[in-house]
Image (tube, rainbow, N blue to C red):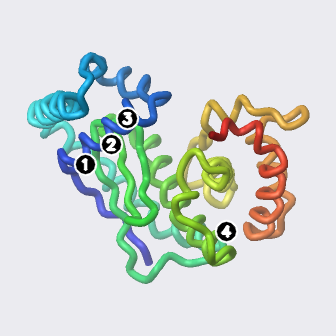
Amino acid sequence: MATVKFINITIKNEVENIYHFIFNFGSWSKYVFKKHPALKKALDFHAKKDRVNFIKKYASGYWLKNQKIIEKSRRKYEKDWRKVERKFFNELESIIGTKFPKNKKISAYISINPICPRFFNKWSFNIFNKFDTRRSREIIMHECCHFLYFKKWKEMFPNAKEKNFDAPHLIWHLSELASPIILNDPKIKKYLNIKAGFYEEHEAVRIGQKTAPQYFAEIYKKSHNLENFIKIAFKIINKHRNLFFLN
């Protein structure tokens, strides 16, 4: 059985991720600035070295000042997660139709970054340090669902390239629709206690008279298993690919 290991992120990785969402994935920078308005000053620098140094100075100072609070969050997340981990993983394996690798360790890195990226090749993800336990549980379930979903995808499509599991690729879009749909399955939702949310961008996409989450949730309900859902849903999202803000 897999297990989630809760670890404090390194400053090096903290800086790399914050830099990425400010300068390489700029549409998400608003979420960083909302929690850390002082980081807007990074935009005043033109050289990457100066930007990185500014973010590093800010992140190091924030961690030093808030270390005890962040550690308290780490312990809180872990305590809450252990209540549901085994039961959730059993249900998830049943729904997705594949198992986690034996004794797999999934790393959850506690971060001051409000955006929570995941890294399939490392089976790791970041989690913001200021969530309540309902939100932290949703994030952990969402990312663990991604890992098992993409494992299933590779079993179905052995030639799939892992780079296509990330934005802005169409496979990524479908995964971001599929994960909350799976978490809202009654078999899973009983462990979540809240409704799993979708990206605002996906809520804005309409296929016929339905939003994209509504449309694909109906396909999920009609599918006998996740493999059927993937086959049907991928054909449909390909048909409507122009709606999914692809580069």
Q: Residue furthest bottom?
A: 102
The label on residue 95 is 4
Report the front residue among 116 and 3: 116
Mark 1 residue type:
Asn
Q: Residue at x 74, y 41 (%)?
A: 213
Q: Quadrant of the N terminus?
A: bottom left
**Mark 1 falls on what kind of element?**
helix
Report the front residue among 233 and 77: 233
Q: Position of residue 48 (x, y in %)?
A: 25, 33
Mark 2 residue type:
Asn
Report the front residue among 148 and 153: 153
Q: Is residue 120 left or right of residue 161?
A: left
Q: Quadrant of the C terminus?
A: top right
Q: Residue at x 43, y 23 (%)?
A: 30
Circle 1/circle 2 CB separation < 8 Å: yes
Q: Residue at x 39, y 75 (%)?
A: 104
Give me the C-alpha separation between circle 3 and circle 4.
Answer: 29 Å
Q: Position of residue 150 (x, y in %)?
A: 58, 66
On the image, which quarter does residue 37 sit in? Answer: top left
The label on residue 17 is 2
Front tag of 2 and 4:
2
Q: Residue furthest right?
A: 208
Residue that numbered label 1 is attached to: 13
Give me the C-alpha separation between circle 2 and circle 4.
Answer: 32 Å
**Mark 2 falls on what kind of element?**
helix
Disc on the earlier residue, 2 or 4: 2
